[in-house]
Image: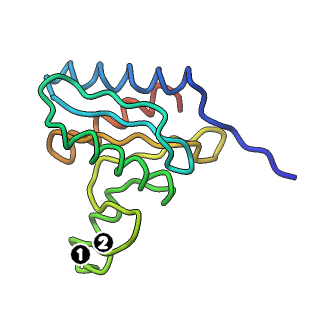
Amino acid sequence: MQSKAVISLEAVQNILNAARAEAQRNQWPVTIAVVDDGGHPLGLLRLDGCAPIGAYIAAEKARTAALGRRESAGYEDMVNGGRSAFLSAPILTSLAGGVPVIIEGQVVGAVGVSGVKPDQDVQVAKAGVLAVAA
């Protein structure tokens, strides 16, 4: 039998708080989504000024990072590099901004952020991840 770490409600709150602080420090209106390792939603925070679609996109970025066990930017890089077939992959978004949460060497969930430029989305997501992965 194997055992694995799981993401706790406290960790979800810490992620949302840290990501929110990073976004607000930069005055970026984003949505932040947190999912478990199966891509199921655990938390969502849409800051004032973020378009409603941000909630959907952030959740999909998080789900992609959790299920793929890697940053969603990797898929965007593949598409931009000519692997356009990834645009039709099921349950996958090819947009940067999804970052896995790794605890004890295992992916326990992911954070997705949407609302600003791709590198800014990633910056906010990584700030959230650092709150629990440190």
Q: Which residue is mark 2?
A: 78
**Residue 47 to residue 71: above or below:** above
The relative height of residue 90 versus residue 119 in the rendered view (above or below) is: below
> Where does the image place residue 81, in percent across and percent down from the top left?
23, 75
- CA separation, marks 2 and 1? 5 Å
Q: Percent x, y for residue 106? A: 63, 47
> Residue 102 is drawn in which quadrant?
top right
Disc 1 crowd rating (10 Å Cα; few below 14, some 14-19, many 20+) is few
Q: Which mark identifies residue 121?
A: none
- Mark 2 and mark 1 in contact? Answer it, CB < 8 Å: yes
Q: Secondary structure at mark 1?
A: loop
> What amino acid type is highlighted by mark number 1?
Gly
Give the residue pinned by disc 1. Answer: 81
Q: Amino acid at mark 2?
A: Met
Front-lying residue, 59 or 72: 59
- Locate residue 122 relative to residue 131 in the image: left or right: left
- Asked where in the image residue 105 lies, by quadrant, the reply is top right
Q: Position of residue 6 (x, y in %)?
A: 65, 37
Residue found at x 46% / y 40%: 41
Q: Is 13 on the left or on the right of 96, as rendered?
A: right
**Label tally:** 2
Relative placement, left or right, of 103 versus 75 is right
Q: Residue at x 37, y 36 (%)?
A: 33
